[in-house]
Image (spheres, helix red, strand yellow):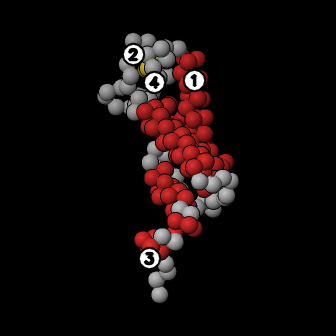
Amino acid sequence: MAMYMDGFHFTLFSGPNTNCLIFFFQAWTLDTIAKFIVTMVSVFMLGVITEGIASYRSNLRNRKFASGNMRRLVLSSMSASQALAGYLLMLVAMTYSIELLLSVVSGIAVGYAYFFGGDGSATRVKSDPCCAHDKDEEDDQISLTSDRDRNTPLLRNITRPIN
């Protein structure tokens, strides 16, 4: 069974006649308690890594590390990684296993506390990991526009200050 179709379940405490969950691939069937616990830890770590990617990407965007195409490539790769991790976490939550859902949420919470300090000093709250990159992509496009591009007639009027 890829996911429970009748709502959330406590998977570890279900009876022996309960169908086993499939974790992403048919070969990754969670048919033992040990596999399920390893999966819970892996999902927790994926949540932490998702917040780590968001933090690293935010730090990269705010400093000059490369220019032109290399900067675009690195920031695009980071955006794709953040989106992929977020969508994988969403798929895990869609299994309707309470234990896996708690692993997702606690991994994101611990990752946020570790990478962003958890004291509210972060510039953006990333509460939706699978879609948090949308606003960041707008910021990336703005930061990728070079001074040379801003001097073209079209952009000169857009970027000039309003009096």
Quadrant location, the N terminus? top left
Q: Which of marks 4 and 1 is nearer the N terminus?
A: 4
Q: Nearer the viewer, residue 131 or 104?
A: 131
Which amino acid type corresponds to the residue marked 2 in the rendered image?
Asn
Relative to the observer, which residue lies in front, 57 or 130? 57
- Looking at the rendered image, the disc whose residue lies closer to the viewer, 4 or 1, is 4
Which of the two marks, 2 or 4, is nearer to us in this view?
A: 4
Label 3 or label 4, whichever comes before in sequence order: 4
* Residue at x 56%, y 67% (from the top left corner): 148
Mark 1 or 3, which is nearer the eye?
3
Question: Residue at position x 45%, y 38% from top?
Answer: 87
Q: What residue type is labelled 1?
A: Ile
Residue at 41% x, 29% y: name it.
95
Contact between marks 3 and 2 (CB within 8 A): the answer is: no
- Sequence-wise, the earlier of marks 1 and 3 is 1
Q: Residue 37 carries which label?
A: 1
Residue 150, position as x, y percentages in the image: 51, 69
| 3 or 4: mark nearer the eye | 3
Q: Are marks 4 and 1 in contact (CB under 8 Å)?
A: no
Asked whether disc 2 touches disc 1, contact meaning CB atoms under 8 Å apart, the reply is: no
**Mark linked to residue 24:** 4
Residue 92 in the image: above or below residue 142: above
- Point out the residue furthest to the bottom here: 163
Neighbour tally class for label 1: few under 14, some 14-19, many 20 plus, Cα within 10 Å = some
Alpha carbon separation for disc pair 2 and 1:
17 Å
Describe the element under mark 3 as helix, strand or loop.
helix
Q: Which residue lies furthest to the left in this view?
A: 6
User: Which residue, as the protein is rendered here, is positioned at the far top?
Assistant: 17
Q: Distance between the residues labelled 3 and 4?
A: 50 Å
Sort mark 4 into few (<14), some (14-19) or many (20+) by Cα contacts within 10 Å.
Answer: few
User: Dot 3 corresponds to which residue?
Assistant: 157
Q: Can residue 94 be seen in this view?
A: yes
